[in-house]
Image (cartoon, grey):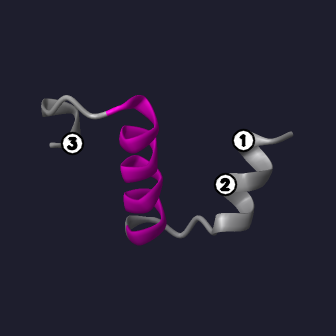
Amino acid sequence: MVSDYSFETDTIITAILHDTLEDTKLTKERIRLRIWR
């Protein structure tokens, strides 16, 4: 898992968002709207 390594927080968040886009039906737009309300 990405969290098992000494990555910066930004890298971990990017990996989670990347997997979310690949593994769910969420779109980039929906994620963007949730983050920057």
What is the crowding at mark 1: few (fewer than 14 residues within 10 Å), some, or many (at least 20)?
few
What is the crowding at mark 2: few (fewer than 14 residues within 10 Å), some, or many (at least 20)?
few
Q: Which mark is residue 31?
A: 2
| Residue type, mark 3 in image | Val
Q: Quadrant of residue 18?
A: bottom left
Q: Position of residue 10 (x, y in %)?
A: 46, 38
Judged from this view, the residue extending furthest toward the right is: 37
Task: Give yes or no for residue 14 being in the magenta stretch.
Answer: yes
In the structure shown, which secondary structural element does the residue marked by tag 3 occupy?
Answer: helix
In the structure shown, which secondary structural element does the residue marked by tag 1 occupy?
Answer: helix
Give me the C-alpha separation between circle 2 and circle 3.
20 Å
Foreground tag (1 vs 3):
3
- In the rendered view, tell whether residue 9 sits above or below residue 13: above
Q: Main secondary structure of the magenta part?
A: helix
| Residue type, mark 1 in image | Ile
Residue that label 3 marks = 2
- In the rendered view, tell whether residue 33 sits above or below residue 11: below
Q: Are marks 1 and 2 in contact (CB under 8 Å)?
A: yes
Residue that label 1 marks = 35
For marks 2 and 3 on the same chain, the one whose residue lies earlier in the sequence: 3
What is the crowding at mark 3: few (fewer than 14 residues within 10 Å), some, or many (at least 20)?
few
| Residue type, mark 2 in image | Ile
Residue drawn at (38%, 66%), measured in percent from left and top? 23
Q: Position of residue 15 (x, y in %)?
A: 36, 51
Residue drawn at (65%, 66%), measured in percent from left and top? 28
- In the rendered view, tell whether residue 34 sits above or below residue 30: above
The residue segment tinted magenta is: 8-22
- In the rendered view, tell whether residue 19 sits above or below residue 36: below
For marks 1 and 3 on the same chain, the one whose residue lies earlier in the sequence: 3
Of the pair 26 and 35, the residue shown nearer to us: 35
Quadrant location, the C terminus: top right
